[in-house]
Structures are given as C-alpha cells and as structure tokens.
Image (cartoon, helix red, strand yellow):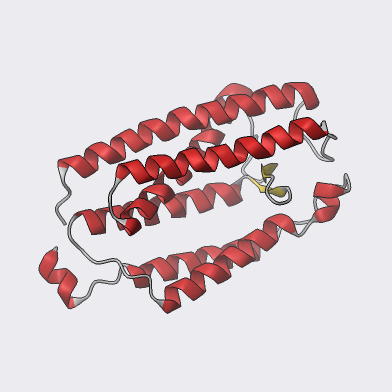
C-alpha cells in the first residue's frame, strides 16, 4: 500500500488539530468542575443552572460541527471524509482524557465514571468505554483513509450497516439506560461491560467486511 505525502501530511495536521481541540475541551471541564465539584468530580451529579446546560448542549453541537468541518476539508471523497471524521473524533476524545489527566490528575483509573455527552440525555459510563471506542474509531478511520487514498476500494454493504447499527444501539443503551443516575440524582449502577464488548466486536467485524480485499483491490494497491 503506497501512501502519498499529501495523505501523511493531512493525517499529521489532523493529529495536531485533535490534540489542540482536546485541550480546549478539557479546559472547559476544568472550569465546570471548579464551579460544581470543587472537591473533585463525583456522583451524584450536581444540579447545574438551566441556562448553563443549554449553553453546554449548544457547545457540544458546535464541537461536532467543527469536527465534521475539518473532515470535509481534509478530503474530497465521501468515505474518505468519513474516515477522517472517525480519526479526528477518536483522537480528540482520547486527548481530552490525556489533558484531563495532565491538568487534574483525573481519572485515577479507567474505571472512574464520567459524563460523556449531553444530547439528547446525559451519557454516563466508565472512562474505559469512550477510550476503547476512540481507539477503534482511530484505527477504522485511518484504515479507511489509507485504503481509499491509495486507490483501494471501501464498500459498506448491508452486513456492515446492520452490524454498525446494532453496535451503536447497544453502546448507546449502555450509556443512556441508567436514568436514575443521570436525571434523578442517583449513584450509577454497574456498567454493562458486555454491551460495550459486543458493540466493539460488531464495529470491528463491520469494518473488516468493508475493508475486505477483493481481486480488483489487489490490482489497484
């Protein structure tokens, strides 16, 4: 597989952007935790001002827009752009936790719980869950970019779509199902690690099918 200098340069710039944007994201959390968790982040969740929650939701929407915009600028072809989006999102989320560790020495362990997202309801789970998902996103996205940029084929057929949708449903349920902890001020129940594991397996299989080398691919790589 021959990787062009342009692709290498773009991937390097994507890495730099994700590292910087991850730092911006982590500093926002530093400020919020200073306001609402001065003694350290913990459950039950503190009650936030409604206006601030609205601003946070809007900020998360703006974050996704920015990540998508960079991926659109990084490439010209649809699936290649999606690959870059996976890489950028995964690196951004991964470095978000790296910078939190640097700034707050948190998390103490990958099993520590965190609020992951707020749309449409708060997502909660142990840090290891978004970290593993980010690693899979980075690898899948990079493989997609490298395959397409080197002239190979990437085909997301029906089996890949079904597995990816099932994986997404399972992992979202693992993050959103504990409404007692997110909406009623409770302590999180045991995380459903088996759902995370199944979703990761489904994602890996779906991308393995999409990246499967065919005879036409061998002639073009």
Q: Is residue 37 visible?
A: no
Q: Residue at x 33, y 51 (%)?
A: 142
Residue closer to the observer: 20 or 56: 56
Residue 50 visible from this viewpoint? yes
9 versus 221 height, above or below = above
Left or right? Give the position of 26 relative to 71: right
Is 104 above or below relative to 128? above
Q: Is residue 107 above or below residue 209?
A: above
Is residue 70 or residue 125 the one in the foreground? 70
Query: In the image, what residue occupies the spot 29% across and 53% down?
Result: 145
Q: Quadrant of residue 10?
A: top left
**Front in this rendered view, residue 124 or 64:** 64
Q: Residue at x 56, y 67 (%)?
A: 167
| Number of numbered discs on residues | 0
Q: Is residue 106 left or right of residue 98?
A: right
Q: How far across and how far down the image is residue 144, in percent?
A: 32, 57
Q: Position of residue 69 (x, y in %)?
A: 42, 41
Q: Position of residue 26 (x, y in %)?
A: 58, 29
Q: Position of residue 158 (x, y in %)?
A: 43, 78
Q: Is residue 147 left or right of residue 97?
A: left
Q: Residue shown at 23%/44% (left/top)?
A: 7
């Amino acid at each position: 597989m021959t990787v062009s200098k342009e692709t290498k340069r773009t991937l390097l710039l994507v890495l730099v952007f994700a590292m910087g944007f991850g730092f911006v994201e982590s500093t926002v959390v530093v400020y919020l935790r200073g306001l609402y968790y001065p003694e350290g982040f913990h459950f039950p969740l503190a009650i936030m001002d409604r206006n601030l929650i609205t601003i946070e939701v809007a900020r998360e929407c703006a974050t996704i827009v920015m990540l998508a915009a960079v991926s659109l600028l990084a490439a010209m072809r649809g699936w290649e752009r999606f690959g870059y989006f996976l890489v950028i999102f995964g690196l951004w989320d991964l470095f978000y936790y790296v910078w939190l560790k640097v700034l707050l020495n948190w998390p103490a362990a990958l099993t520590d719980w965190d609020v992951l997202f707020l749309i449409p309801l708060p997502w909660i789970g142990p840090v290891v869950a978004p970290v593993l998902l980010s690693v899979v996103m980075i690898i899948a996205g990079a493989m997609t970019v490298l395959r397409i940029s080197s002239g190979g084929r990437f085909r997301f057929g029906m089996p890949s779509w079904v597995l990816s949708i099932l994986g997404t449903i399972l992992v979202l349920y693992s993050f959103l199902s504990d409404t007692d902890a997110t909406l009623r001020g409770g302590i999180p129940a045991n995380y459903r690690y088996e759902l995370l594991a199944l979703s990761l397996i489904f994602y890996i299989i779906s991308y393995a099918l999409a990246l499967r080398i065919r005879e036409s691919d061998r002639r073009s790589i």
